[in-house]
Amino acid sequence: AQTVTQSQPEMSVQEAETVTLSCTYDTSESDYYLFWYKQPPSRQMILVIRQEAYKQQNATENRFSVNFQKAAKSFSLKISDSQLGDAAMYFCAYRRRSGGGADGLTFGKGTHLIIQP
Amino acid sequence: KAGVTQTPRYLIKTRGQQVTLSCSPISGHRSVSWYQQTPGQGLQFLFEYFSETQRNKGNFPGRFSGRQFSNSRSEMNVSTLELGDSALYLCASGGQTNTEAFFGQGTRLTVV
């Protein structure tokens, strides 16, 4: 079974600085998706960024980018120019490509990101 | 386009009762999946429905069940509630390729 590990329960960063959240995963599959979700105090899970395992190029979405290292099974999220609105719980998630999404997502335990003004 | 809608937002039930939660996916989405979120166990996959068929189920007891209707709306039911069932229940819908999951705001269930 696949597992997702986020080793940083909490991170703190100054506004406008850059922060990197870590995620490692374990799977025997070769084709899969990785995601970062943000959960603000409103509790709604918001998709931040998606990476497809067969793509070597790291995904980027505005101030958010990932460092995907497939051999190391590592998937970190970098947030540049941190803003107060980035404060939230961040979850790393995995889903295998085959199965048409029936498997559901496997989530890490989350990292609580604090933005210091 | 309206997002995923979950009702009710908050619910308080007594041990032993049963509860039904509802989820309306994004228009055109045919997949609905359910997750339980607790402080201790984190986010755990409950089950996934696609075109009215349950395709997969997580490691939960049979007290947890669900169904999906022809309009893709889904309900989940928990019977004989236990204190440990207190959680945030999240519903997500998936698009044509069902690659990404789009979440609703959740239903906060408290069992007393």
Image (cartoon, grey):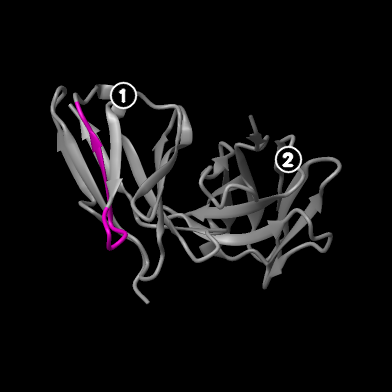
Check disc 2 and report the residue beneath it: A29
Q: Secondary structure at mark 2?
A: loop
Drawn side of residue A26 relative to residue B103, left or right: right
Q: Position of residue B59 (x, y in %)?
A: 45, 27
From this viewpoint, is residue A117 visible? no
Q: Position of residue A66 (x, y in %)?
A: 74, 58
Check disc 1 and report the residue beneath it: B84
Identify residue type, mark 2: Glu
Drawn side of residue B82 relative to residue B37, left or right: left
Q: Tell me which chain the residue with mark 2 is part of.
A: A
Q: Magenta segment range? A: B69-79
Residue at left offset 34%, top offset 72%:
B2
Q: Are marks 2 and 1 on the same chain?
A: no
From this viewpoint, is residue A28 visible? yes
Q: Quadrant of the C terminus of chain B?
A: top left
**Label 2 Cα crowd, 10 Å radius (few <14 / some 14-19 / many 20+):** few
**Label 1 Cα crowd, 10 Å radius (few <14 / some 14-19 / many 20+):** few
Residue at left offset 59%, top offset 56%:
A116
Q: Quadrant of the N terminus of chain B?
A: bottom left
Placement of B25 over or under A53, stated as above or below = below
Q: Nearer the viewer, residue B109 or A50?
A: A50
**Residue A71 covered by magenta stretch:** no
Residue at left offset 19%, top offset 24%:
B80
Q: Tell me which chain the residue with mark 1 is part of.
A: B
Q: Residue furthest bottom?
A: B1
Placement of B54 over or under B60, stated as above or below = below
Identify residue type, mark 1: Gly
Drawn side of residue A90 relative to residue B25, left or right: right
**Residue B77 covered by magenta stretch:** yes
Placement of A13 over or under A73, stated as above or below = below
